[in-house]
Image: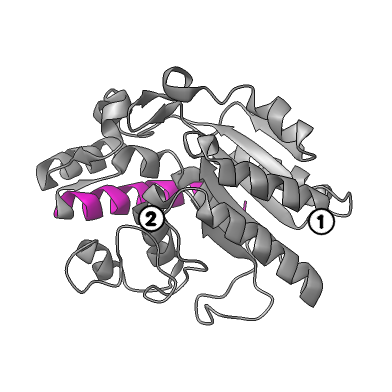
Amino acid sequence: MDCDIKEVCRNIRCDTVMSIGRLGVGHIGGCLSVVDLLAVLYFEEMRIDPKQPRMAGRDRFICSKGHAGPAVYATLANRGYFEKDLLLTLNAGGTNLPSHCDMNRTAGIDMTTGSLGQGFSCAVGAALGSQVEGDGATIYTLIGDGESQEGQIWEAAMFAAAKKLDNLIAFTDCNGYQIDGAVAEVNDVAPLADKWAAFGWHVIDVAEGNDPFAIKDAIERAKRNRGGGKPTMVLLRTVKGCGVSFIEAMGALNHNAALSEEDACRAVAEIRGV
């Protein structure tokens, strides 16, 4: 890799927990489970320019899993889209960093999302638009395994396959939990690999979904699928709260949890190994 991706992941994790710790509450579990993906996308894979966030023909990332907004912000700050001080204004009055991503308020955000399923449809539309324009962009999008219970996900999936959108690479954060408990117990979405394949998608299943090297390999495999006429779904088997043991141990309770500044400092110490 071109950078120390493990260090990038640590930086993003630390900034994410500190921003939520300043606020006192947030979607800490689902943010930490996707940090490694975001680091690989923004620091290794995407054709972007922080100085030109609306650059024509850029690759785009659409976070349909809106709860991960704070992790996206921490990634953008580390990539140079805005100053890190702004992270401490997360969800405060008048902030440019609302709880869910807003393209009209935050540099680097490619689509306003929040209502589960909506962002995925927008990503499909962006991929279609890119093909019509012929700009060569790759469109990336992230959904959750609990979000996969939404019918809108599967309507968009059918459309993407029908239109042969092989410039679309999607990821499912399979961390196993949603707000009310384990996904398998609330409304099981398994077997996801078989379902996506049945909907006409190229499927890559990554057992170590928090390993940036495994993620990068999956993305490279997905890119080699371009020209095959199928969009790609990468299933990332992740740990909710990954990187902080006391947050991981909360299970479903870390979906939207209280996190004091003292807790955040304790989490940072663990992430840094000090």
Q: Residue at x 57, y 41 (%)?
A: 151
Give, as a single range, the part of the protein colored magenta.
Answer: 1-22
Instruction: Describe the element under mark 1 as helix, strand or loop.
Output: loop
**Label drawn at residue 69:** 2
Q: Main secondary structure of the magenta part?
A: helix
At which x and y percent is residue 170?
64, 47
**Front one among 54 and 120:** 120
Say above or below: 48 vs 207.
Answer: below
Q: Look at the numbered discs 2 and 1 and tell me whether their residues touch, using CB distance below 8 Å.
A: no
Residue under the image location 46 percent in, 48 percent down: 116
User: Going 43% across and 53% down the picture, which residue do you hit?
Assistant: 115
Looking at the picture, which amino acid does disc 2 mark?
Gly
Instruction: Please say whether residue 135 is visible from this viewpoint.
Output: yes
Residue 148, position as x, y percentages in the image: 54, 37
Residue 163 image label: 1
The mark lying in front, picked from 2 and 1, is: 1
Q: In the drawing, what numbered circle is on residue 240?
A: none
- Side of 151 relative to 11 (left or right): right
Q: Disc 2 on helix, strand or loop?
A: helix
Whether residue 210 can be seen here: no
Magenta span has 12? yes
* Amino acid beneath label 1: Lys
CA–CA distance in space, label 2 to label 1: 29 Å
